[in-house]
Image (cartoon, rainbow, N blue to C red):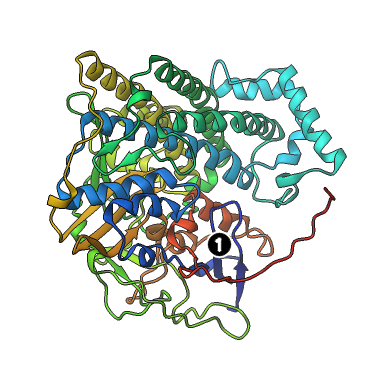
Amino acid sequence: MSKKKIVIDPVTRIEGHLRIEAEVDDDGVVTEAWASGQLFRGIETILKGRDPRDTGLIASRICGVCTNVHYRASVSAVENAYGIEIPDNARIVRDLVTLSLFVQDHVVHYYHLHSFDYVDMPSGLEADTKKAVELASKYHPKPYHISTGHLEAVKEKLQNYVNAGRLGIFSNGYWGHAAYRLSPEGCLVHASHYLTALRIQRELGKAVAIFGGKTPHPQNMIVGGVTSVMDMLNPQRINDFLFIMKEAREFIERAYIPDMKMLVDFYRDEIKAGDGRGGGNFMACGGYGFGRDAKLFEAGIILDHDFNTVLPMDETKITEDVTRAWYAGDEPLEPYSGETEVLYTDLNPDGTLKTEDKYSWIKAPRYEEKAMEVGPLARMLIGYISGSETIGPCMDDFMRDTGMELIDFCTSVGRNAARAVEAQVCCDAVFSFVSDMIENIKYYDEETWSRYDFESLPKDAKGCGIFEVPRGMLAHYVRIENAKVANYQAVVPTTWNASPKDGSGLRGPYEEAIVGLKLSDTSKPLEILRVVHSFDPCIACAVHIVNAKGRKLSEYKVRSACSV
């Protein structure tokens, strides 16, 4: 049987540059896959020699989307190294900013980055608005902004885009592809919520900025705590924050969750076929405590889709392999000893990856030599099996209404369902975190920073800041010598999920989830894009390019379509 090579470069609607190459047999089945990050990240190198108190503001520039979480992980790594305990209020403020980002990120991911893989947007113009209202009402008794009048307005807006030739992002899609399953009415409902989500995500950005100072790149964190004390003590600021989160919760409960239930109904065959199912190894570090004993996420390990057992997670068992990555090194290293020495071996003469050699700027993290999937799916599975009181009820409701089993979540559609459930869990939890903060203030606890004397801190130390963030488990490792950063490594969620093969040939999660897919049309590999997008890739986090000496790298001239 012959095989052909499919190259998708770049994969769009993600953060950063990703290339996917896949071998497909005569039946259109993917037999092998390679995921390649196409830029080099040099932030770790730039941080060497810096004052440890400055790492947060630099590390937050790893990505333009995940700015807060890198900032927090970096500051926390330094605090961990020096043994600095931050006040409870500082932790709560940091948590509120991060959890707001969770909700915003998940809404943006599905509606604006991923929905086009399932929603044939132009077919929404053919929808019967009355039937569309009936369809939406099947999944919620009061669907969000769904009425015949509103949907007619949405159809008119879409038609105006078509008539004016201003399709924008709607102009580039595999419209009419045989793999689309949603009815025109379903597509119209999703199109309506796509447009509404543009406003919702903007408001959620304001929620992040209320305690973060601004977004992207908040500046409210310092080693020892936060500088948001005046926002925390201002009732109007708290009320503004809660108002936004209440509206976000309405959108999640009446639009996002129902749309996921609709997606499950229309794509049930793909779910049962296991489209996008990976190796079955999941990992989470847990965290985000509130109240007296409650915890938002549970830590643990699931191996080989064994949903009866959650093993303890031990961060000391993490290593990074660079056998197939464009770095020098011949053995896996634990992050404190990690190296970022470039060894670029180029592409083949025909421009394809050297798939038997090094082929990605992304390293291959492993946990006890196993490739692990991280992210909302891992958190929801581990939390549910662990008996989480925050995750369990939401997962039970979704499974009851859709008939899904845990194994069904381990698919492309299932990852999206898990992400929507997590948005619901995080949004609900925000109100408990605010209650904790108000309770502290009520009893005159207004501390937001732990005072310390830098000169008296140890000159040599090492520490790790490890958190669950929207795309999965994030860890920043710092080793300090003579009061300066001697080594710095960031092991990010997309490094786990988008990793290349390691020295033993073990595929990374993207690669494993792509293999076995059956493509309807090899010239339009929509099914592959569904799998990759379902992980919510952030290649900018996993790879980055910069010239530390400030020299010009390249110069480009862009011709504008209009004059100013």
Above/below status of 448 relative to 317: above
Is residue 375 shown above or below 225? below
Residue 442 pos. (x, y %): 24, 13
Relative to residue 79, is residue 554 depicted above or below? Answer: below
Residue at 52% over, 55% down:
532
| Up/down of 300 relative to 31, above or below | above
**Residue denoted by label 1:** 17
Q: Quadrant of the N terminus?
A: bottom right
Closer to us: 277 or 49: 49
Location of residue 504 (image quadrant): bottom left
Q: Judge from the rendering whether residue 550 lies leftward or rightward of residue 475; answer left or right.
A: right
Q: Is residue 303 visible?
A: no
Seen at 49% across and 49% down, the residue is 536
Which of the 4 image quadrants contains residue 430? top left
Q: Where residue 533 sits: x, y (%)?
A: 53, 51
Q: Residue at x 30, y 53 (%)?
A: 475
Q: Residue at x 48, y 54 (%)?
A: 538
Using a 10 Å C-alpha cutoff, classify the residue at mark 1 as few (fewer than 14 neighbours), some (14 to 19) or many (20 or more).
many
Task: Left or right? Give the position of 173 relative to 217.
Answer: right
Q: Is residue 108 visible?
A: yes
At label 1, which amino acid type do we have? Answer: His
Q: Position of residue 230 (x, y in %)?
A: 35, 24
- Residue 78: x and y in percent read 24, 51
Q: Nearer the viewer, residue 80 or 112?
A: 80
